[in-house]
Amino acid sequence: MPDLEDEKVKTEVMNLHTAVYQKFGYEMKYIRPPKGEFSERTLNLTNNLGYTSVMWSLAYDDWDENKQGREEYAKKKILDNIHPGAVILLHGNSKDNTNILDSVIKEVKNMGYEFKSLDEFVR
């Protein structure tokens, strides 16, 4: 986003907002800058559009479709790095994530953690 002109940022964000609302009836209020790339200007722009920017605290290279078939690696990355207040970034195109998500959720809960929405997150 930092390389985009102000109007292009606004158009892209609001087109996504409209599409999500039309398809799911959900009003988006949080935004994760693509690739985690942002600037003070783009944070201000999205803030002025009514969004709260949220970054992740735990991620791994699950987005790379050439690096699939590493389910044990994925589980270990997540479970070894889980921490109080973690915001976990998992990409939907990862077959590994799809295959391990149920067991990871159960294991994280067994470790004493619970999952909450950003609205419920205690700051």
Image (cartoon, rainbow, N blue to C red):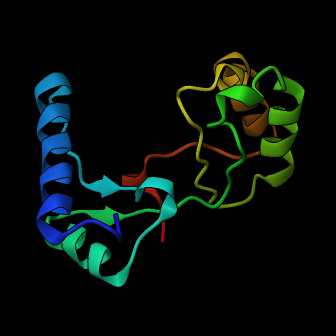
Image: 5 above or below 15: below
Q: Nearer the viewer, residue 42 or 97?
A: 42
42 displayed left or right of 16: right
64 displayed left or right of 118: right
Kindly identify the residue that appears in the image at 20 percent across and 52 percent down: 13
Kindly identify the residue that appears in the image at 50 percent across and 62 percent down: 36
Q: Nearer the viewer, residue 58 or 1?
A: 1
Where residue 97 sits: x, y (%)? 67, 26
112 displayed left or right of 7: right
Image: 49 above or below 86: below
Q: Residue furthest bottom?
A: 40
Based on the displayed image, in which of its 4 quarters is residue 53 positioned?
Answer: bottom left
Q: How many discs mark residues in the rendered view?
A: 0
| Viewport quadrant of the N terminus | bottom left
Q: Nearer the viewer, residue 63 or 76?
A: 63
Where residue 96 sits: x, y (%)? 72, 23
Where residue 44 sits: x, y (%)? 24, 78
Where residue 55 sits: x, y (%)? 50, 62
Kindly identify the residue that appears in the image at 74 percent across and 22 percent down: 100
Kindly identify the residue that appears in the image at 58 percent across and 54 percent down: 87
